[in-house]
């Protein structure tokens, strides 16, 4: 079973905006890989990929008919995976068409269906990613007779051809009214179903075992900083222990006053907001974030720099109104509140997931990150990995670290990609894990 994560996101310190995937509506100009010139579509191809594809064609000429048949099987499977991504783009075009068709459900509630389109896209892209990874493992094992690098380049060449042709063709069809026969009621129903499917399971992450909980309490009693912070957050959120903000703050103070940089960071965050049921105190937030930053804790530096830029606190009622009006940041705040039982929010995981999906569907990075963690912890790894990857691509350092941990025992190369991104943002966990993976690499 996946080890449960105990986490809290209070201050958004993001240098990156929403990722490109979040806008699933094709851009006004043709996407990278293909472009339209009058009535002609030209495809821009990476010269290195094209060169290796030619080398692949030459290598194939020397193979037996049986070997060629095996390669063809994997080519067809790869096309099937790529087709899933084209279907996402097609659904985006259908949705865009229905937005302009007066009287349709999609036209009446554009923000809702744009968010649901993002959820639909993640579902399909997650399946596509998982299928592609499984396919790659299979063809590498079944095709020792062909150079792996050449075959990989060939599949990338095919993918570029499909996307380079497919997306511009959809755009041309849209401009020429090729979507006029779209059944907008059916499109709305499909997006509604995708959203319902993602939000139907609002289960809470697995609780720590009684023995593990006892160990956390014992370690906290012994003054171990990490246990003090973990137990503090459990009391602040009412997770597996009595909800007691006063006791939670006392535990955070013990960790912080003992000189622990992470404890100082978390105490500073707790004082920066009323999200955990604590009284905001800007002066104390600056004090503890400053102490943590002075020890070189990068997240504290970023949080401290953004503290004065924070807007005044918003009441729960005001936040709900903003969320209902479609504000992605408010939807994230409300969703996190319900999912974790923050502050005045009663813990309602299913309600929390619904709000987080609406926020993530609009491309809000921290909502993607929280959903990724939640789904990974509730036995929905494919969907969770999809959201976590999108959050990591948007620059959320915590998701980059968790992806590194996930891939560490599965794909060392992929793990290092994400951990190095997190390390570049100053995350000490990532720096340590990069050193460990590189030290353990085969000589």
Image: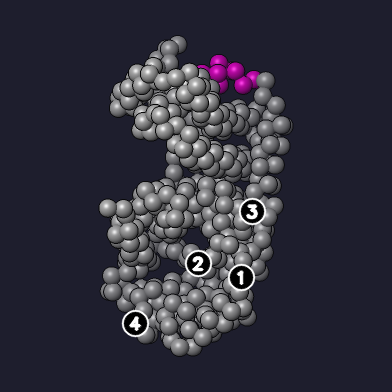
- Which of the pair 115/67 is nearer the observer? 67
Say if mark 4 contacts mark 3, CB within 8 Å: no
For the record, the magenta segment spans 171-180
Per the rendering, the mark at residue 207 is 1
Residue 131's image quarter? Answer: top right
Work out whether mark 4 precedes mark 3 in sequence or the reverse, and give the earlier one: 4
Q: Residue at x 37, y 48 (%)?
A: 413
Say if mark 4 contacts mark 2, CB within 8 Å: no
Per the rendering, the mark at residue 364 is none
Residue 245: percent from left, percent from top: 55, 80
Work out whether mark 3 precedes mark 2 in sequence or the reverse, and give the earlier one: 2
Q: Which residue is mark 4?
A: 259
Colouring style? one colour
Local packing at callout 2 (Cα closer than 10 Å; few below 14, some 14-19, many 20+) is some
In the rendered view, would you say 48 is above or below 13? Answer: above
Q: Which residue is mark 2?
A: 8
Residue 287: percent from left, percent from top: 35, 78
In the rendered view, would you say 305 is above or below 63? Answer: below
Work out whether mark 4 precedes mark 2 in sequence or the reverse, and give the earlier one: 2
Work out how far the residue at label 3 is from the one at label 1, CA to CA, in angstroms. Answer: 22 Å
Nearer to us of marks 1 and 4 is 1
Q: Which residue is mark 3?
A: 354
The residue most toward the bottom is: 222
Q: Secondary structure at mark 3?
A: helix
Work out whether mark 3 precedes mark 1 in sequence or the reverse, and give the earlier one: 1
Work out how far the residue at label 2 is from the one at label 1, CA to CA, in angstroms. Answer: 16 Å
């Amino acid at each position: 079973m996946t080890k449960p994560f105990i986490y809290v996101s209070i201050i958004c310190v993001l240098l990156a905006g929403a990722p490109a995937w979040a806008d699933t509506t094709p851009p006004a100009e043709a996407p990278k890989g293909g472009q339209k010139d009058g009535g002609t579509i030209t495809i821009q191809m990476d010269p290195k990929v094209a060169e290796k594809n030619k080398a692949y064609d030459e290598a194939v000429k020397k193979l037996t008919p049986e070997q060629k048949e095996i390669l063809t099987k994997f080519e067809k499977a790869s096309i099937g995976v790529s087709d899933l991504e084209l279907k996402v783009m097609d659904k985006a075009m259908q949705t865009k068409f229905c937005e302009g068709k007066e009287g349709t459900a999609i036209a009446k509630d554009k923000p809702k269906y744009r968010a649901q389109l993002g959820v639909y896209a993640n579902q399909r892209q997650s399946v596509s990613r998982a299928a592609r990874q499984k396919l790659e493992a299979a063809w590498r094992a079944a095709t020792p007779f062909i150079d792996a690098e050449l075959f990989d380049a060939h599949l990338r060449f095919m993918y570029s051809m499909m996307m380079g042709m497919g997306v511009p063709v959809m755009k041309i069809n849209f401009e020429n009214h090729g979507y006029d026969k779209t059944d907008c009621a059916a499109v709305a129903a499909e997006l509604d179903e995708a959203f319902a499917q993602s939000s139907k399971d609002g289960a809470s992450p697995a609780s720590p075992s009684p023995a593990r909980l006892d160990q956390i309490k014992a370690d906290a009693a012994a003054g171990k900083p990490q246990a003090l912070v973990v137990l503090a957050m459990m009391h602040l959120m009412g997770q597996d222990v009595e909800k007691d903000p006063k006791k939670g703050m006392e535990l955070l103070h013990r960790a912080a006053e003992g000189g622990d940089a992470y404890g100082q960071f978390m105490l500073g965050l707790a004082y920066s907001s009323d999200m955990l049921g604590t009284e905001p105190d800007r002066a104390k937030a600056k004090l503890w974030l400053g102490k943590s930053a002075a020890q070189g804790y990068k997240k504290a530096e970023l949080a401290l720099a953004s503290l004065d830029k924070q807007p005044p606190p918003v009441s729960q009622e005001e936040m709900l109104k903003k969320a209902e009006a479609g504000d992605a940041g408010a939807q994230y705040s409300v969703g996190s509140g319900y999912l974790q039982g923050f502050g005045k929010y009663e813990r309602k995981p299913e309600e929390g997931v619904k709000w987080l999906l609406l926020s993530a569907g609009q491309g809000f990075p921290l909502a993607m990150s929280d959903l990724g963690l939640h789904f990974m912890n509730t036995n929905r790894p494919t969907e969770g990995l999809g959201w976590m990857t999108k959050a990591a691509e948007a620059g959320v350092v915590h998701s980059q670290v968790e992806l590194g941990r996930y891939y560490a025992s599965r794909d060392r190369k992929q793990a290092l990609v994400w951990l190095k991104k997190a390390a570049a943002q100053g995350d000490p966990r990532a720096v340590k894990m990069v050193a460990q993976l590189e030290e353990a690499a085969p000589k």
